[in-house]
Amino acid sequence: MKGTLYIVGVGPGDPELMTLKAVRILERCGVWLAPAAKKDGESTALGIVEGVVARGDKEIITHHFPMKKVRMGQSPDPEVKEAWDAAAARIVGHLQAGRDVAFPTLGDPAIYSTGFYVCETLFALAPDLPVVIIPGVSAIGASAAAAGQPLCLGDDRLVVIPATFENGRLRETLEQFDSVVLMKVHRVMDRLVPLLTEMNLLDKAVLVERTSQNGQRIRRDLTTALHEQPHYFSTIIVRKT
């Protein structure tokens, strides 16, 4: 009997934000393959899991996924593709041996998650293997909660985009939508702050760093972030109303 791959959303940082289902699946699976951003580095997702679920006698595999841009419709960087292929091959071996595998991923798997790239690669190798997606609390929702404000109400139009878009696309998006969530902002504050200032939106924006994690920080004056680069886990919410 073949095993099942579970892509498990473990939330943005606080282990108490993991769902009961996520905990149950992780307790049941004998193999965890956890993503790590650096070679020989620790997995943030695994650290969250271990705040609730004991390792016990589980086989823990930490797999490095390079943090490089992936653009839809374009071939990924060869190093990124190699990481996906290697992860999928390791998972296939366990599944075909009848072992269930859990892939813990930050936030919700449906939002900019490496888990889905691994799924696509897995299906290319063995399309008949079962995969189950376990949703989780997103960093987007957790950031809004930390800031004490809604993402959208009534007939508000909400959009979520990477802040790495060029300013022309960002301007167009900020003009068209009532509520804008900007992800991946930590390296582009020098572009974002002047743009928001020019559009008279700076006082409508809030920056949340390391939401629900140790060291969480909320900034309502984004100009302070120009002098010190925000943490990688940073999100800006711009709500016009």
Image (tube, rainbow, N blue to C red):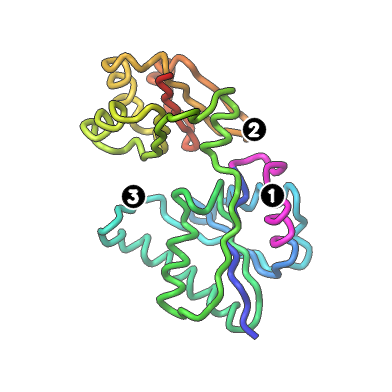
Residue drawn at x 75%, y 49% as measured from the top left: 52
- First in sequence: mark 1 or mark 3? 1
Check disc 1 and give the amino acid type.
Answer: Thr
Residue drawn at x 30%, y 53% as measured from the top left: 71
**Does the magenta-highlighted stretch encompass residue 118?**
no
Q: Quadrant of the N terminus?
A: bottom right
In this view, the residue farthest toward the front is: 155
Q: Is residue 208 left or right of residue 78?
A: right
Q: Nearer the viewer, mark 2 or mark 1?
A: 1
Residue drawn at x 60%, y 65% as measured from the top left: 6
Q: Are marks 2 and 1 in contact (CB under 8 Å)?
A: no
| Badge 1: residue crowd in 10 Å (few <14, some 14–19, many ≥20) | some
> Taken as a whole, is the magenta stretch helix, strand or loop?
helix
Separation of residues labelled 2 and 1 (CA atoms): 19 Å
Q: Which mark is residue 69?
A: 3
Residue denoted by label 2: 214
Residue denoted by label 1: 19
- First in sequence: mark 3 or mark 2? 3
